[in-house]
Every structure is written in structure tokens, then in C-alpha cells.
Image (tube, rainbow, N blue to C red):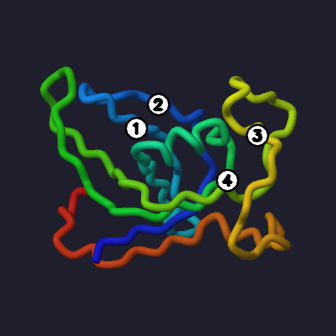
Amino acid sequence: MNVFTFTGNLGRDAEQRYTSSGDSVVTFSVPVKSGFGDKAVTSWIKCNLWGKRGESVMPYLKKGQLVGVSGEFQCREYQDKDGQQRYSNEVRVNDVNLLGKQDRSEPATNSSTPSPSAPVKRDSFDDLESDIPFISSILSVSDMMGQPSHC
């Protein structure tokens, strides 16, 4: 089992692109902080949400939005333009939850998509909102066996 669950605020607005076969993928990045004090480390996690689920949540994924994400973790290795070996921490998203307050000042960009001010169904903890300061740093990792040590 490979499940990575975390919360954080989006670092920028989500981006949508399409594969050559026409499949939609919505991509967004979330910083995840671990440790504390002088040993605190922030890792940026690239999240990929495929298909209609990504398309439907895209209008809500704006910079600063607090999200809870769960999915399959992988450390992807690639070469950059200069031929240097690089690594990317990525999650293929299975579940994304909009947490915290939403920005109600921005109108929807398309009348066929839901308005960002529309209520979002949450499973639980509605009354907690941002009252608990440590909630955004909860990090749960299951079965990281076999992960390269450089990720």
C-alpha cells in the first residue's frame, strides 16, 4: 500500500493541460513542512489530478487555498535542460478536500463551472476551520518502502 496524505496551502493557481490522447491533468504544488525549529524542512509536492475530477475542482484550486490531499506517492527522476539529474516528489491524487475559508471575491470564469462561493461539502471537522494551528502540518505516510534515499 502506498498512501501519502497531507495538508497545505497551494503555492500558485492550478494548471490544466492535456495529454496527446486528450486526457486532462490538473497540476498543483503544495508545500509540506516537517520537523520544527531549526530542523524544520519544507518539501514541495507536485500533485496530479486526472480526468473529470480534476476539471471539476480546478476553479477552486487557487493560490493560498488550504487543501487536504491523499494519493500515491512517487519520486520521479528526470534530466533537466542542462542534462542534470533532478528529482520530483509527486502524488497521483486520489482525493482532494478544500479546507479553510474560500476567497469569495473572485467570480467564476465560466458560467458552466460552479462558482467558487458555492458551498463545498466536507465530510467532517466543519467547525474547526483554522482554529487548530498545527492542522496544516499533519503528514501521514504509509509504506514508503523502496523509496530512493535522495527524495
- The kind of secondary structure element at disc 1 is strand
Residue at 67%, 55% (x, y): give it: 98
Q: Judge whether 27 appears above or below 120 on screen.
A: above
Earlier residue among tags 3 and 1: 1
Q: Nearer the viewer, residue 57 or 148?
A: 57
Earlier residue among tags 2 and 1: 2
Residue at 58%, 38% (x, y): give it: 58
Task: Using a 10 Å C-alpha cutoff, classify the residue at mark 3 as few (fewer than 14 neighbours), some (14 to 19) or many (20 or more).
Answer: many
Gap between marks 3 and 1 measured at Cα:
20 Å
Residue 22 occupies quadrant: top left
Is the Cβ of the residue at disc 3 closer than 8 Å to that at disc 1? no
Q: Which of 80 and 98 is in front in this view?
A: 98
Q: Which amino acid does label 1 sit on?
A: Val
The dot on residue 25 is: 1
Q: In this view, does 110 lie to the left or right of 2?
A: right
Q: Is residue 127 left or right of residue 143?
A: right
Q: Which of 61 and 145 is in front in this view?
A: 61
Residue at 43%, 60% (x, y): give it: 94
Image mark count: 4
* Picture quarter with the C terminus: bottom left
Location of mark 2 (residue): 16
Task: Using a 10 Å C-alpha cutoff, classify the residue at mark 2 as few (fewer than 14 neighbours), some (14 to 19) or many (20 or more).
Answer: some
- Residue 42 placed where, x, y %? 49, 55
Comparing marks 2 and 4, which lies closer to the viewer?
2
Location of mark 4 (residue): 66
Residue 18 occupies quadrant: top left
Q: Judge whether 147 appears above or below 107 on screen.
A: below
Task: Using a 10 Å C-alpha cutoff, classify the residue at mark 4 as few (fewer than 14 neighbours), some (14 to 19) or many (20 or more).
Answer: many
Location of mark 3 (residue): 116
